[in-house]
Image (cartoon, rainbow, N blue to C red):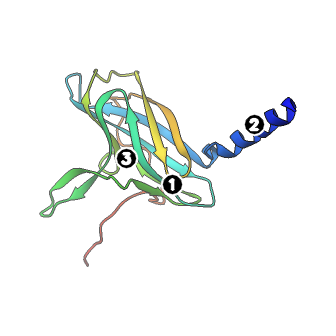
Amino acid sequence: MFKTTLLAGLAACAFALPAFADINIIDPFARSSGMMARAGAAFFIIENTGDEADRLIDATSDISKITELHTHKDMGDGIMKMVHVPEGFEIPAHGTHALARGGDHVMFMGLLQPMNQGDTVTVTLTFEKAGDITVEVPVDLERGEAAMPMDGTGMQHGQMNN
């Protein structure tokens, strides 16, 4: 009786766990503009190896008072502004979505401590289907642009007028 109950419980847990294997976080790094910075950001590529699209809907971290998903939006007249994206970012099936400088990113506002070169920031990413995935993100203040897929997948472009 005990063995049957134990096996049934283990089977139920196996089906209740999120499908982490479908989402991979590639080349993460975080940065701020300096020791006295009040804000910072994290960048990486999200790879979805699954057969269904997923969506990054939230991010949390204990490094800041507020952690949000952000993007840069053209406000007209060539002025770009960072804005919160409450609906998150879609990651297509068998595709990628890049969180990169000048585009979509995880924003840390109200830093509770400096982001020093070589430190690690713990970020929990929440996906609609894959659930929570915790990532250890190295702080790299010397790094330039985030690595981007050569085919431009994950880039968010507005419509171009010809």
Residue plotted at (32% across, 42% down): 68
- Please tell me whether residue 58 is drawn above or below residue 77 in the rendered image: above
Q: Give me the C-alpha separation between circle 2 and circle 3.
A: 40 Å
User: Looking at the rendering, in which quadrant would you find the N terminus?
Assistant: top right
From the image, state whether disc 2 or disc 3 is nearer to you.
2
Q: Which residue lies furthest to the left in this view?
A: 77
Q: Which secondary structure, mark 3?
A: loop
Residue plotted at (19% across, 52% down): 81
Q: Which residue lies furthest to the bottom in this view?
A: 162
Check disc 1 and give the amino acid type. Thr
- Please tell me whether residue 34 is drawn above or below residue 94 in the rendered image: above
Check disc 3 and give the amino acid type. Ala
The number of discs equals: 3
Within 10 Å of disc 3 (Cα), the crowding (few <14, some 14-19, many 20+) is many
Q: Where is residue 11 in the image (x, y as percent from the top left)?
A: 76, 41
Residue 67 tag number: none
- Please tell me whether residue 83 is drawn above or below residue 93 in the rendered image: above
From the image, state whether disc 1 or disc 2 is nearer to you.
2
Check disc 2 and give the amino acid type. Leu
Q: Which secondary structure, mark 1?
A: strand
Which residue position holds label 1? 96
Q: Is residue 144 left or right of residue 129?
A: left
Q: Give me the C-alpha separation between circle 1 and circle 2.
A: 33 Å
Residue plotted at (36% across, 60% down): 156
Q: Which of 142 and 96 is in front in this view?
A: 96
Q: Which of 150 and 113 is in front in this view?
A: 113
Q: Give me the C-alpha separation between circle 1 and circle 3.
A: 12 Å
Q: Which of 45 and 56 is in front in this view?
A: 56
Which residue position holds label 2? 10
Which residue position holds label 3? 100
Q: Where is residue 4 in the image (x, y as percent from the top left)?
A: 85, 36
Q: Nearer the viewer, residue 95 or 126?
A: 126
